[in-house]
């Protein structure tokens, strides 16, 4: 018998990976959670049947959603990650020595619990004494904090289900207010092939708040189409003008990749430049 | 009833696309050929059940396998494409005004025939009067030509079946000899996730022949893992030092992408630097 996990990446496209063992399968208050041992990607976490992370390619997404903003800020001390219950973003954030406290605001405690149990190489950052784990609605959390964070990272699921509010203009206003006067916001903003309108809207909404808004790219094999966008909003610091990079151990990110990630193919440039 | 085409991208991973109509299915002397009308990618060509090209994302691969080398050469007049029977590489090559003759050496006439019939937006370059279509074994063709080409492009299928000889050290020696004294070679060289040893071997083999050997990247949604490598060998011109770019109409390639494509994530750098 062959066991395969399939994700409907779009209504017309699927990715399937061979499953060696179902390590966990259950329903939390927010979503279906499954952990598979796969032949291709090692242990893999799926939420509502969408691949979130896996041992093999997680380094790409987690390095790219964190180090670009963390190196753009000259002295990031207080960092907030909304979502990201697997702990991968926190692990990367804590590689920066300047960081004094990294708060995780994750709505679903079951994601944190399952990640700690089955994905220790990803969730290990959550055990750090500088990690502050808050199980809460990220939107509520951010409303209660003003002028507090140097960097806010939204490491969310797709804009359906629990994460839908994390892609709205109102939410970005709260993020802006929760950031200090030189703060930086960054979010995963989906695929330039399949989510063109979403990327365009996020860019427009952030442009109304932040003087510097930039889109950058990385390729994640297990995400639809591979090519993935991140959008960064900054009050002062420009990611294209970073003077000094912290020396951190990475497999995808580097100072050269930091800069080249902002070089957009014309078809991607058109998404954010079109009116 | 739902119709899906599935490709085994590796033995542990599949991609599936919804098929609206099977436009062609047959067996040539070399391979199984299928053309599907798909919901996600428009018309799609598969050889031996491996996606080769499709109307939606073909621009990425075809622009990136051609313009990097064509712009690196100061005056490319004679260009040879080995494989590439769909015509997409020839179409891009012919966007360069300096090109006087672009030869296609494709082993399988059925691929050319089917592409002309079902993929006119890709194969259109084959109708150009500067296009010279040779149905022949690319290895034999290249043995019969010395010191003739400015640029040789190997636009092959994966290194199994008819294309296996196009990934060997002996073949690269023939390519070297078929190039002029300032000639440039470029080939698609598979995935940095799934074909590590292959990429390493190609790099080593080319280093024994060409003074300048460089790996570059592009992301093609329908190829395994998305991230794709190309390897370029050059006798004189360095792709990192292009002084003037021809003004051509492209959707993925640009002078900035030309340069950033050579910026490799550390895990890719390690593939070609490791001994």
Image (cartoon, coloured by chain):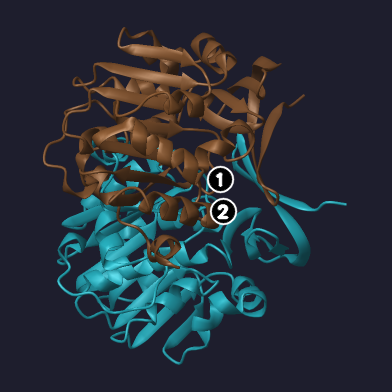
Chain colours: A cyan, B brown
Residue extending farthest bottom: A129
Mark with earlier residue (2, 1): 2
Q: Name the residue under label 1.
A: B224
In the rendered image, the vertical position of residue B42 relative to residue B209, given as above or below: above
Residue at 62% x, 34% y is B50
**Where is residue B79, by image quadrant?**
top left
Per the model, the C-alpha gap separating discs 2 and 1 is 8 Å
**Where is residue A272, by image quadrant?**
top left
Give the camera-side residue of B164 and A152.
Answer: B164
Q: Do the residues labelled 2 and 1 touch (CB within 8 Å)?
A: yes
Q: Mark 2 points at which residue?
A: B194
Residue at 46% x, 14% y is B134
Give the camera-side residue of A125 and A250.
Answer: A250
In the rendered image, the vertical position of residue A111 relative to residue B264, given as above or below: below
Say whether residue A22 is left or right of residue A45. right
Residue extending farthest right: A1
Q: Position of residue B272 (x, y in %)?
A: 41, 60
Please tell me the numbered disc located at residue B13: none
Q: Tag 2, which chain? A: B
Q: Position of residue A84 (x, y in %)?
A: 49, 69
Say whether residue A181 is left or right of residue A11. left
Callout 1: helix, strand or loop? loop
């Amino acid at each position: 018998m062959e066991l395969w996990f399939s994700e409907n990446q779009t209504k017309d496209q699927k990715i399937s990976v061979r499953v060696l063992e179902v390590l966990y399968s259950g329903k939390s208050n927010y979503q279906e959670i499954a952990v598979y041992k796969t032949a291709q990607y090692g242990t893999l976490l799926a939420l509502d049947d969408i691949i979130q992370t896996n041992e093999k390619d997680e380094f790409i997404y987690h390095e790219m959603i964190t180090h670009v903003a963390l190196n753009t800020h000259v002295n990031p001390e207080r960092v907030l990650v909304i979502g990201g219950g697997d702990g991968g973003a926190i692990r990367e954030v804590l590689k920066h020595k300047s960081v004094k406290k990294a708060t995780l605001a994750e709505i679903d405690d079951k994601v944190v619990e399952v990640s700690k149990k089955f994905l220790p190489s990803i969730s290990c950052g959550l055990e750090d004494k500088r990690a502050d784990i808050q199980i809460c609605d990220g939107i509520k959390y951010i409303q209660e904090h003003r002028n507090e964070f140097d960097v806010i990272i939204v490491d969310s699921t797709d804009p359906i289900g629990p994460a839908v509010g994390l892609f709205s203009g109102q939410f970005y206003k709260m993020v802006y207010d929760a950031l200090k006067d030189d703060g930086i916001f960054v979010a995963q903003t989906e695929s330039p092939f399949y989510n063109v309108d979403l990327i365009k809207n996020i860019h427009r909404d952030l442009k109304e708040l932040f003087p510097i808004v930039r889109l950058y790219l990385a390729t994640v094999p297990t995400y639809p189409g591979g090519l993935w966008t991140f959008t960064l909003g900054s009050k002062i610091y420009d990611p294209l003008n970073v003077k000094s990079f912290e020396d951190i151990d990475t497999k995808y990110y580097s100072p050269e990749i930091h800069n080249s990630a902002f070089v957009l193919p014309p078809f991607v440039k058109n998404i954010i430049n079109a009116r």
